[in-house]
Amino acid sequence: MQIHAVDEVIHEVDDETLAALAAEDFEAFAQLYRRHECVVFRVVRSRTPSDDVAEDITAHVFFKALLKAEEWRGEGSYRSWLYGIARNAVSTWRNQKGRADVVLEVVPDLEDPVPSPPAQVVIGEERDLIWRRVSELPDAQREAVVLRYMKELSIDEIAAITKRTKGAVRILLHRARCRLRRQMESKEEETIK
């Protein structure tokens, strides 16, 4: 119950206030991520050849935004600051593509004190719907989601079971969450209509 009250308060706070708190308060950064992840993805996707590349670059954009959260000075909007990071990340990717592979181990293993959106949905009243959606994910993503959220295994344990790197497991989980979020948002839009 208390989590929902905190979420409601955070939803009412503007981006610039959350950005000022993001260096010290991970929940503030998480809210900024939830607000802007899909838009940043679309911007990056419009400049890259595939969803996979765009998802990887989007993850990098938010990782960099988290690392540089205390450098945001409030000059202009937070969204434009993120777009600048995204533009630079796409330029860097274009300059480096063909020269070297992106190292996935740099993706952080930050534990959010609030359950992730898929975990919150599972706990809530839409449990059956979300697990039906999970069953429609590609095999590797479905396996990672089941091991993480149903079996409650750590990233290290999932990596060992699936014979993937920890970075690859994090990317699978990120892609699965993005796909599930898009499906749930489209369902909400259909319900509103």
Image (cartoon, rainbow, N blue to C red):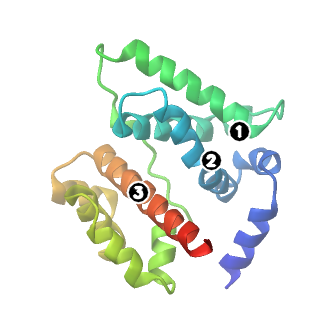
Q: CA distance from mark 1 to mark 2?
A: 7 Å
| In the depicted structure, whether residue 34 falls above or below residue 107 | below
Q: Amino acid at mark 1?
A: Arg
Disc 1 and disc 2 in contact, CB within 8 angstroms: yes
Q: Quadrant of the N terminus?
A: bottom right
Secondary structure under tag 2 reads helix
Q: CA distance from mark 1 to mark 3?
A: 22 Å
Which residue position is annotated with label 1?
79
Mark yes or no: residue 116 visible: no
Packing grade of label 1 (10 A; few <14, some 14-19, many >=20) is: some
Which residue position is annotated with label 2?
36
Residue 97 horizontal side relative to residue 79, left or right: left
> Where does the image place residue 110, in percent across and percent down from the top left?
49, 53
Q: Amino acid at mark 3?
A: Arg
Secondary structure under tag 1 reads helix
* Residue drawn at the location 33% of the way across and 67% of the way down: 148
Q: Between disc 1 and disc 2, whose residue precedes?
A: 2
Quarter of the view holding residue 193: bottom right
Q: Between disc 1 and disc 3, whose residue precedes?
A: 1
Q: Nearer the viewer, residue 47 or 26?
A: 47
Which residue position is annotated with label 3?
179
